[in-house]
Image (cartoon, grey):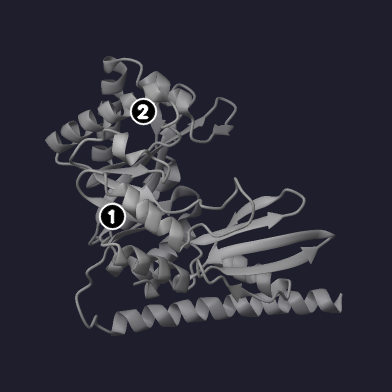
Amino acid sequence: MKGIAYKIFKMVLLIAVFVLLAGCNYNNQLTSKADAKDTIERAAWLAYWDLDAGEKDLQRIGKKLGKLSYFGAYFDAQDRIFIPQELSNKRKELKAKKEKYETYLTFINDKQNADESVIMKDIEVLRRIFATPASRDRHIDDLIALTLQGKYDGIEIDYERIWNDEQIAKSFSLFVDKLYKKAGENKLKLRVVLEPGTPFSIANLPQGPEYVVMFYNLYGLHSEPGPKANRGFIEKTVRQMKALPGETSVAFATGGCLWGDNGKRTLLSEAEAKTIAVIQDSKTKRDEESRCIVFEYKDMGVSYQVWYADVETLNYWIGIAKEQGVNNISIWRLGGNIAINKIE
């Protein structure tokens, strides 16, 4: 019991230190002025399931943001798009604070069934809404109506797993083209989020929208342990995405993942990963190729490995993107980041 009590004490103390440091970093930001104008355009996502922690990060990084995406609206059992109520409430609350950044409403192809179970990244719902020009146009009208209703500056589309289906891929390109034109008629901007495996050179995407490429999931819930991104992955993907038309952005992910040799795999925020390392008295190291922090531990007979990113990792990845001529940086996501205000 003494050992457990000591670990709990260390965890509480660590969390208190995290909060204190975050507060100090925020105060330092407020009391100092930038030495020079940033050349980086920054964007970030605020997720509906982590709004309180996300808002705390937003308070520390908000003055550095050019764009904030509210994530996200998805499909109900009748294929109708809807916004989680808690996200709508947070939008109203933050809008009253006169934000200085552009705001986007993110639409995702998750689907909530009648029993409230959720299908993640459902391509069948996309197949149905892209089935005919009429169904596609109705969907576009719904997206625009919800975006205008929430008084956002733009629409963000994050429809995934589409490029392995030729018909859906073709329909998606037509959808983006029509949505961009219709959005423009309503004075709305358009961002389109793409997976790193997108066939950029043959995707036939239209000129006009900002295309945001995910630079994460190199390793994750789908794989063995490893970093969400590293130098080789970033450099390769930047080269490939040069085939995209118009304005582009790269998106890096905060936090990391835990893998157990019993098959358990869990996404973690930076704060969660640091807390586990303290509780388990684990020695951490920084991976050279990715600059992620890595540690291992054993609990109840199960061996675990954790890889996660902190602000040093993120700044390293951003630096690689800048070397490749990319200055538009998006961060997935706000919430649970210890020193997000120190991002470059």
Q: Distance between the residues labelled 2 and 1?
A: 35 Å
The quarter holding residue 205 reads top left
The quarter holding residue 60 reads bottom left
Q: Give me the residue at 59% from left, 58% from top.
A: 226
The reply, left or right, for residue 294 in relation to residue 2 is left
Observer-nearest residue: 239 or 215?
239
Q: Can the viewer see residue 94?
A: yes
Q: Residue 169 carries which label?
A: 2
Q: Where is residue 170 in the image (x, y as percent from the top left)?
A: 32, 25
Observer-nearest residue: 148 or 269?
269
Q: Nearer the N terminus, badge 2 or badge 1?
A: 1
**Of the residues shown, which amino acid type is indicated by label 2?**
Ala
Residue that extends furthest to the right in the rendered view of this protein: 1
Q: Where is residue 299 in the image (x, y as percent from the top left)?
A: 80, 63
Q: Which secondary structure, mark 1?
A: helix
Q: In this view, does 152 lie above or below 285?
A: above
Q: Give me the residue at 28% from left, 30% from top.
A: 173
Circle 1 residue: 95
**Of the residues shown, which amino acid type is indicated by label 1?**
Lys
Q: In this view, does 146 lie above or below 102?
A: above
